[in-house]
Image: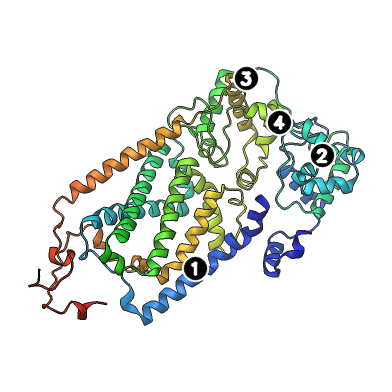
Amino acid sequence: MKNKATPMPFYLVSLMLLLPIALGAQEAAAFFQQNCASCHTIGGGRLTGPDLKNVTQRKDREWLIRFMVNPKGMIDSGDPYAQQILEEARGVVMPAVPGLTPETAASLLDLIEEESKLPESAFKGLQITDRPFTQREIELGRQMFTGDRGLTSGSPACISCHTMKGLGGLGGGRLGPDLTRVYERLQGRQGLGAWLTAPATPTMGPLFRRYPLQQDEVLPLIAYFEHSAQQGGQDTSVALLNFFFLALGGTAVALISFDAIWKWRFRAVRAPLAQGGRPRGET
Amino acid sequence: MTNTQSYFDPLLFAVLPYVVFFTFFLVTIQRYRTRTFTYSSLSSQFLENQRHFWSLVPFHYGILVVLAGHVVAFLFPRELLLFNSRPLRLYILEVSALIFGLLTVVGLTAAVVRRIREPKIRRVTSTSDWVLFALLLFQVASGVYVAVFHPWGSSWFAASVSPYLWSLVKLNPDFSTIAAMPLAVKLHIVNAYVVIGFMPFTRLVHVLVVPNPYLWRKPQVVRWYRRPGTMAASKG
């Protein structure tokens, strides 16, 4: 629809980069794992988003495809079923999935239908223990967050982009959101576990597809996030101010040093020229 | 907003880089062959030497270190991430980087003020110089903004921006890792391309022929001999 007014070259470039073709069963499964499994299971219960088992029986395919391709648009249009989905997800809007064309959406629905028929789907989600986490696990998670303990795949530590309350020092990064209460936002261990297995946001997705977290790394991170959410609150901007003023102080020191290092610099430059450039002999 | 941004993304992050690099190479070579003696930063030190120091020195040392940081993150992303794996090292690196970023801002601002406030300097400032100043000011200001409000850039550059830049080198542009970056980061990247594309038309070409001993050599005194009454003739 939008493309009607699109200049041809832009359209062609976009088209070349986003090849909208239907996926085979294996590709659909891989796509689901990378883009959907962080919020949805098939028969494993609700995570951030609803359990998709038999979803095609709850709503017609045409509606589902429209929603999948443009979730925010459907919610904004005031569609009652989209509103209900939003309410059940406690206001979390499903993000637009890069590369999810109507053709891909149809392939995904085929996959969901097939998986719904199975007694146990491959996408029923991660089963995570209910027992209380140990102090050691929480500490391990904290070390993974800060980078003190490197992640096996070589992916960057969480602190690169995220902050948490009580991190100390100059805090964590702020490219992504504060994760102090992410445990609550993603609705507990199951939701968080699924998310960490295949982070699906546009920033984390492409990165963690290359460097996925290992199963045994997910548990300590959940432990740390759960512990942090229990403490409550969120990180303040104090660390950010400290960072800025530290650098500002350093800049002042550097400027003073420059002045000292070049204290013998030539200062008095050709006064007659600088004061008007009149030829010599005139005043 | 997201739709508009993603609509222009292929153009800005997959097409523009090649356009500016081709412009850069072709025009710098052509200019060197046809107008060799314009390859200069056109020193104005002999016209004004008080404010000059406070623009020249902080700007150049600042920008050289900051640019070197970007190059290291591009060439050695894994090693950089490994270095940053201790929070203390990460903090020291980031504070140092921001210091040099701020020095760049101080130097560039001083340079612009000097050019505006000194009539002699204003007279030797061309339109392309003003455009260049605007582009550079935007570039370093957005860089400092990103450093302060979206830390820790040294890590996420290595993780997300390096793969994108390498995809450009490999002629297989993949901007998925930066597609969802905050607007300030995207503007910083796009403006960097604009600066590179505009560079061969400006005095910035001096970086390609910079006499490196500038960085450590002793100050050199330029003497100005002129016979009375030749001011008008020597202008231009």
Q: Check disc 3: other Cα within 10 Å, few if <14, some if 14-19, many if 20+.
A: some
Going by the numbered disc 4, the residue's amino acid type is Gly
Q: Check disc 1: other Cα within 10 Å, few if <14, some if 14-19, many if 20+.
A: some
Q: Nearer the viewer, mark 4 or mark 1?
A: 1
Task: Give the quadrant of residue A23.
Answer: bottom right
Both on one chain, marks 1 and 2?
no
| Residue at the extreme front | A283
Q: Indicate the secondary structure of the residue bearing disc 2.
A: helix
Of mark 4 and mark 3, the one earlier in the sequence is 3
Please report contact status of discs 1 and 3: CB closer than 8 Å, yes or no: no
Q: Indicate the secondary structure of the residue bearing disc 1.
A: helix
The chain under label 3 reads A
Both on one chain, marks 4 and 1?
no
**Along the line of sight, the residue nearer the viewer: A124 or A283:** A283
At which x and y percent is residue A252?
Answer: 29, 41
Answer above or below: position of A243 versus A272: above
Q: Indicate the secondary structure of the residue bearing disc 3.
A: loop
Task: Give the quadrant of residue B233.
Answer: bottom left
The chain under label 1 reads B
Residue that mark 1 sits on: B21
Q: Residue at x 15, y 56 (%)?
A: A267
Answer above or below: position of A271 versus B27: above
Q: Is residue B226 left or right of residue A131?
A: left
Residue that mark 4 sits on: A191
At which x and y percent is residue B161?
Answer: 53, 51
Going by the numbered disc 2, the residue's amino acid type is Ala
Q: Is residue A122 left or right of residue A13?
A: right
Disc number for residue A133: 3
Of mark 3 and mark 2, the one earlier in the sequence is 2
Q: Check disc 4: other Cα within 10 Å, few if <14, some if 14-19, many if 20+.
A: many
